[in-house]
Image (cartoon, coloured by chain):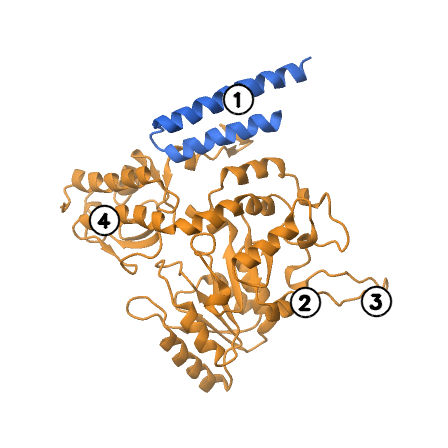
Amino acid sequence: MAFQALYTLTDIRMILRETAPSHELDPEQRKAAERLLENLERQVSSLKQEMLK
Amino acid sequence: MRCAMGIEARQVNELAINIDPIQAGGRLTADAMKAAIAYGDGYSVCDNCRKPNRLDYISKPPIAEFHRDVAAWLGMDAARMVPGARRGFQAVAHTYVHKGDPVLLTSLSHYTEFLAIEDSGGVAREIPAGDHKIVTADAAAAKIEEVKHEFGRPPALAFIDQVDYQFGNMHDVKAIAKVARQYDIPVLCNGAYTVGILPVNGKELGVDFVVGSGHKSMAAPAPSGVLAATAERAAEVFRTTAIMGDVTNRTFGIKEPELMGCTLMGVTLVGMMASFPHVKERVKHFDRELKNHKLVTDALLSVEGTKILSEYPRKHTMTRVDTTGSFDKVAETHKKRGFYFTSALEERGITGLIPGATKVWKFNSYGTTQKQAGHLSAAIVAIAREHGLTVTE
């Protein structure tokens, strides 16, 4: 799960690179960012449950 | 934010458009970053190293397959990964060049080719580039004859840069190699700026070796690169060890002396491997890169007094520019001197130029999106106008 979250963050990082310097997202990028951030929240939540059980 | 004590987290490519001439093609893909996260430990690719214990035989991760694929992709018979293109030059020079041997390169060759020759005791002889900073087959033929006259024998090896680092100009490697073959001179094509950027096929070029740079043009961590060879030359450069210890009688299997055994044993190699599918695909779309590049060169040329010193129209995205007659005029009286220009670019989220450079400088737009290329173009025009330079529509 740690890797999954890191990889999701890496995908988010790539969006930052593609949109530098303004980081204004077009509709497609915004959709991708929303999906990635939702995944990240889920992954962090699972990690929390696993590690702190 | 820091990675560790004294080491700032590098966010250059996240915060700005980076047009550093040598960094553009080496930016990692997402897959290479992910591989780097998992394979950061020292000998990370060696978990499943089995007899005959050599890097290019490891099948998990699929390193053996990767070596075969890279060789085929370059139109060559064998390939080895090396710690940077320079180590490829060194391996080849060390195989063919003996003390006092003349070696051919060009007046636009990279310094590491000179060092490879020096390291082997060779003597450098440069094919002069013509007025347009292009190295031609005719000039190569003339230089070979000159060398024969001087040394009584042809050069032992020739290094030809497909695209040179000074102007980013494209040189006719195929025609030069054809001339060299008439004298039985092995030819190494230096593809540091082409392998991973645009299609390169060593067989079609008629060369003995193709060298590429992972960190310059194959979206890989440094130091990484590739040395690919024809079957005939592979047997020579990738020969295996024959040495034996006199006390222990130890021998060292099939390790290759020119490569000092195994080469890229961790994050560099998996980075190259992870980016490879993307690199194979991106070379097919170099026309898009040239289109974006043109947006930038058009903007530069719209500023009166600016010259493109590289061949034009451009065949590569790394370009040498002369702004002595434009942006440098402003620097003469500006309180920040030449630094005003790079500061103005930085303010607009553009980085990678040598700070203070307003006379002759290089940039590389490779990897920018169309929107980013547009932003860069608009920034150049805006800075010019802001400082009273004439911009033609």
Q: Which residue is mark 2?
A: B239
The 10 Å Cα crowd at callout 2, few under 14, some 14 to 19, many 20 or more, is: some
Circle nearer the viewer, 1 or 2: 1
Q: CA distance from mark 3 to mark 4?
A: 67 Å
Q: CA distance from mark 2 to mark 3?
A: 22 Å
Q: CA distance from mark 1 to mark 2?
A: 49 Å
What amino acid type is highlighted by mark number 1?
Leu
Taking the spot 51% from the left edge, 31% from the top edge, the residue there is: A10
Image position, residue A51 (x, y; %): 67, 17
Image position, residue B375 (x, y; %): 28, 37
For mark 3, give the secondary structure.
loop
Q: Which residue is mark 1?
A: A40
Q: CA distance from mark 3 to mark 1?
A: 60 Å
For mark 4, give the secondary structure.
helix
Q: Inspect this view and state whether residue B82 appears.
A: no
* Chain letter of the residue beneath label 2 in the structure image: B
| Chain letter for the blue part | A
Taking the spot 73% from the left edge, 45% from the top edge, the residue there is: B48
What amino acid type is highlighted by mark number 3?
Asp
